[in-house]
Image (cartoon, helix red, strand yellow):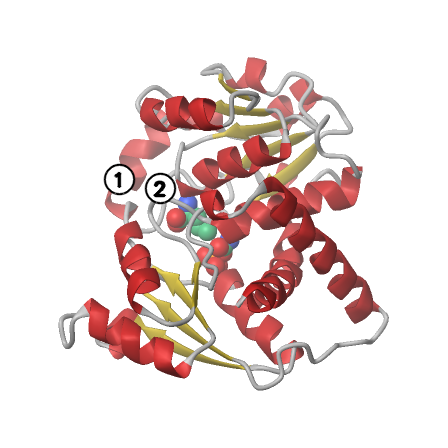
Amino acid sequence: MRHLITLHDLESSEILEIFALVQELKEKQKSGERPQLLQGHTMTQVFEKPSLRTRLSFESAMWELGGGASFFTCKEAGLDGRESIEDVARVIGGYSDVITLRTFSHELIEQFAKNSNASVINALSDLSHPCQALTDLFTMQEIAGDVSQQKLAYVGDGNNVAYSLANCCAKLGVPFVVSSPEGFELSSDFVASLKANIPDAKLELEPDPQKAVAEANVIYTDVWASMGQEAETEKRKKIFADYQVNSKLMTAAGSNCKFMHCLPAKRGLEVTDEVLDSRQSIVFQQAENRKHLAKGLLVWLMQQA
Ligand code: CP
Ligand code: NVA
C-alpha cells in the first residue's frame, strides 16, 4: 500500500514512471481512447477547503478510468468531532481504494494514512501540495523534454506549493530559485534538511526577484495569502508588492521564458492580466494536466497495492 503525502514518498525513478504513465494516458485520451484501468475502483475525497482543479481533476480522472468517486466535506465526514479521526479513517478505508484529503493540518493526512486501509493522497495541506508540483514538473517536461537544464524561478510566498516544488525539483535535478520577502521564505530547517537528504539539490534562495529570474526558463508564482490566511490579505499586499510577476519581471528573464501559476490567481496582485493572458503563460495547460497527472498517479498507486 503506497501513499502520496509529500514528495518524500516517491523515489526520483518512480516520479519518472508516473510521468510516463501520465503521458501515455494523455496521448490515448487525445486520440479518443479511455482505457478502463480502474474499473470497479472507488475513490473517496474529503476536503476541508475549497477546490476546483484538485477535486475535479481526481473526480474526472477516476470516472475516465472506469472507477467511481464520492465527495465529502470534513464536516460531512464527521471530522468536526462527531467521531474520532481514527474511526473515520478506518470506515472510509473500508469502502475505498483511494482517499484524497485536502486539509489545513498536514498531520490529519498522516493520521488517515496510518489508520485506513487505502492509498492516501494529499490533495493539499498547509505544508504541501505534491500533486500540483508533480503536474508542474510534468508540464515543464512536456514543453522542454529534459527538465534538468530548465531553471525554475518561484517568486512569492514560501508556501505549500513552493515547498512541494522544491522537493520535486530536487528529486529531478531541476535548478530551483525561490525569491520571497524577508520572513516569508522557505523555512531554513526545510532547506537544510533538503540539502542534507539530496546533497546535489540545486536550490537557491534569492531575495531580489530581478536577480532570481535572470536566465529562468519558467517563472512561477502563487497567491500571496493562501487559504486560511485571508485575514492577512491587506498586510501581505504591502509586503509582497515588489514580488508581482509583471511584464518588467518577465522581460528580465527573456522572451522565451514561460509563466506558470497553480491557480486560482488573484489577478492584479501576484500576477498582472498582461502576463497571465500572454503567449508565455502556460497556466491552462498546467491546469488541464492536473487531470492527466491524477490519472497516471491513480493507476500507478493501484499497481503498487
Ligand atoms: N491548483 C489547485 O490546487 O487548485 P484548486 O485549489 O482549485 O484545487
Ligand atoms: N497556496 C495556495 C494554493 C492553492 C492551490 C493555498 O494553499 O491556498
Residue 264 seen in this snapshot: no
In the rendering, at what x and y percent does residue 165 appear? Answer: 52, 38
User: Is the CB atom of the residue marked by disc 2 within 8 angstroms of ligand 2's nearest atom?
Assistant: yes
Viewer-nearest residue: 263 or 276: 263
Number of the label disc, if any, that sits on residue 160 = none
Residue 298 seen in this snapshot: yes
Residue flagged by tag 2: what amino acid is it?
Answer: Ala
Report the label total.
Answer: 2
SS class, disc 2: loop
Viewer-nearest residue: 64 or 97: 97
User: Label 1 belongs to which residue?
Assistant: 232
Residue flagged by tag 1: what amino acid is it?
Answer: Glu
In-image side of 228 versus 13 (left or right): left
SS class, disc 1: helix
Marks 2,1: beta carbons within 8 A:
yes
Viewer-nearest residue: 225 or 303: 303
Number of the label disc, if any, that sits on residue 225 = 2
Residue drawn at x 21%, y 68% is 85
